[in-house]
Image (tube, rainbow, N blue to C red):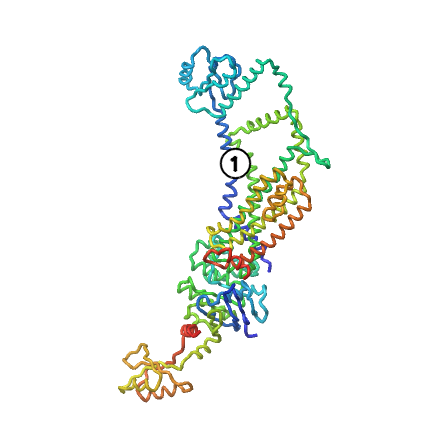
Amino acid sequence: MSNLLETHQVSKNFGDFTALNQVSIAVPKGSIFGLLGPNGAGKTTLIRIINQITMPDKGSVLLDGETLAPHHIQHIGYLPEERGLYKSMKVGEQALYLAQLKGMSKAEAKVKLKYWFDRLEIGDWWHKKIQELSKGMAQKIQFVVTVLHSPKLLIFDEPFSGFDPINANLIKDEILELKRQGATIIFSTHRMESVEELCDHIALIHKSNKILDGPLNDIKKQFKSNTYEVGIKSGQANLEQELYDKFQAQPASFKTLDNELKLNLKIAEGSSPNELLNFLTTKGEVTHFVELIPSANDIFIQAVKNN
Amino acid sequence: MNHLPLIIQREYLNKVKNKSFIIMTILSPVIMIVLIAVVAYLSQLNNNTQRTISVLDESGMLESIFVNTENTTYNVLHNTSLEEAKKTVEKNGEYGLLYIPPVEILDSIAQHVKFYSEDSPSLSLISGLESKLEKKISDLKLLNDGVDLDQIKSSRIGVNIGQESFSGEKTSKIDSVLKLAFGGIAGYLLFMFIIIYGNMIMRSVIEEKTTRIIEIIISSVKPIQLMLGKIIGTSLAGITQFIIWLILGFLLFIIVPPILGIDMSAIQSTQEQAIQQAMQNPGMSTGMQQGLEAFHNLPLTNLIIAFILFFLGGYLLYSSLYAAIGAAVDSETDTQQFLLPILMPLILAVYIGIFTVIEDPHGTVSTVFSFIPLTSPVVMLMRIPFGVPWWQQLISFGLLCGTFIFTVWFAAKIYRVGILMYGKKPSYKELIKWIKY
């Protein structure tokens, strides 16, 4: 079993509104899986179904090969986008309560909490009330509560919102550390640079339908257009015109030292970049030659526009 | 996994440890007792006011009735004119002057008596004087007509109808009063309990929505467990508060009056007087004994069992509705629209209890409303002391249980959807749609 979580043809309607339409995803064990999509696409509904907060109308969800059942709750850690804590409860009591709800014993939870509070250097907050803490501080505690029971599957919905760059980085490192220890992570966000940085796999949901999924690199290969960014110094005056005639070319802009000719050149399907490079070297001095790889951002925008 | 005990524990401790809850619990009985004490003290102060009233009786027939009392001194004037008397009274700063004109015919005295004073005199004083005069004048009239007053006195008699059911149970008026008190207290207690702690449950549901912790919680527990945990935990906190109030109230009632220097014996002595008066009245001579008998006559076992069952059933029924309202809205200000339909049957039940059950505990209206689930807990609790056939109690309780299960199901549906809905206040139409989700 290489997939920790699979959803099969999951559909959910709210009255006349279809929130999810036959969505199937497969989250490989030990991966960071980016669940992407525009606002209102149905991501939160899917996440809530995985957490058994709402039940799907049709379709099934498998966790580690078993149909999702109430006892699976203790194997899942969920950090919702809309999150908060009891304002008037003390940090320690609250964390213990939430840990016990996840099925931990009180003693076990205390030991683990001490470990995490020391690790994130928040040990002296134990007796403070949430209302005395800043938003970022409360977020740290929510993060601890989410991961405390060492779940197999972690679901983070916009985990970095509300953090300053230093703390966001700290949390990012913790997420990577959890992955190293074998956790599988579903990661939902609109910040494409963190998708780029963290995710191995992605799925894109748009208007209740899954429109794209797979390993991030495969998807990038699928979206790449055989276009190369080229800088060339040459004495030949009509070189620009010649290149425009020979290839699909567009002006490019990047930083260089000299005033060379900068273009994006698209080569025909099946031809190798070496041919292009060889051709260019006959024309002048090549200072810059890079394949244009579509960013997660580009893929997101393009996929959503095409649908 | 069953997290219900854990949720109940948190809800309970969270309520009980809350500062405003502690303050309310301790302060409420103190405030109540202090208020009662202050009122008692003030009225005592008022009663102690010394008044001097001058009386100018020019008819010379009524002087004998003006006997000094503890608080009032009568100063009977002779050989002076009305004008002079007024001046003297004003100069001496006396409370007032009662003037009886020099008339021979008793009827016209009654019309021409006057009371002069600086401010308008107290109502009780005037009516006191009036009744004194009325009694004396009518006695005088009877004497004039040649009637023997002793004969009239001995002809007076009190009637007290003894009541007995066909099966031979003796009842009395005291019996009815006691039943009424039992039923009334039980019904009113339930009413208060629902309003106070139902609101508390509602607020605690809203709190979870506004702090946005709800999604974290229900990714671990079923919404219905959370809802039931909240209801039970808050109710236990409520029962704790009630018991503390009872104990504190009892203690304070013993401790406070001596500290404030209020003479409780004054109140006691008036009670004793009343009892003595009752004893003198031949019809009431067995009053105490009847009271005890009446207490024994109450269907006590039935009363206690029914109280527990109907109290629980009624309270849980309403509190699940309160929880559903809390889940449907975002803030307390939005709750009014939904609270009204819940409060209406509750208030209706109390009014029916007060006006109809007292008049006719087994009449059609009382009986019907003691079956309708939303009003039955209050109305049935008020009816039971008067003796309700067990089959009626069973049917009513069965209906209550059925409705309770239905409302919990209904509330859980609304709760499940509502807790994750933010933003605009839902309409009734939307609430019905939620049930189908």
In this rendering, the count of numbered labels is 1
Query: x and y percent of residue B8 in the render?
Result: 57, 53
Query: x and y percent of residue B350 in the render?
Result: 57, 42
> Which residue is farthest bottom?
A282
Q: Viewer-proximal residue, A239 or B170?
A: B170
B31 versus A261 height, above or below: above
How many C-alpha atoms fall within 10 Å of the one at disc 1: few (<14), some, or many (≥20)?
Answer: some
* Residue B42 in the figure: left or right of residue B384: left
In the rendered image, the quadrant that contains the N terminus of chain B is bottom right
Q: Viewer-proximal residue, B223 or B176?
A: B176
* Residue B172 in the figure: left or right of residue B249: right
Q: Viewer-proximal residue, B49 or A208?
A: A208
Is residue A6 visible in this depiction of the protein? no
> Which residue is farthest top?
B79
Q: Which residue is rendered at x = 58% and y = 14% of the image?
A: B145
B387 versus B107 height, above or below: below
Is residue B107 visible in this depiction of the protein? yes
* Residue B398 in the figure: left or right of residue A5: right
Q: Viewer-proximal residue, B89 or B49?
A: B89
> Which residue is farthest right?
B167
In the rendered image, the quadrant that contains the C terminus of chain B is bottom right
Query: x and y percent of residue B38 in the render?
Result: 49, 33
Residue A264 figure quarter:
bottom left
Amino acid type at mark 1: Ile
Identify the element where label 1 is drawn: helix
Residue B179 figure quarter:
top right
Residue denoted by label 1: B33
Query: x and y percent of residue A188 in the render?
Result: 46, 67
Q: Chain of mark 1?
A: B
Q: Which residue is rendered at x = 49% and y = 58% of the image?
A: B213
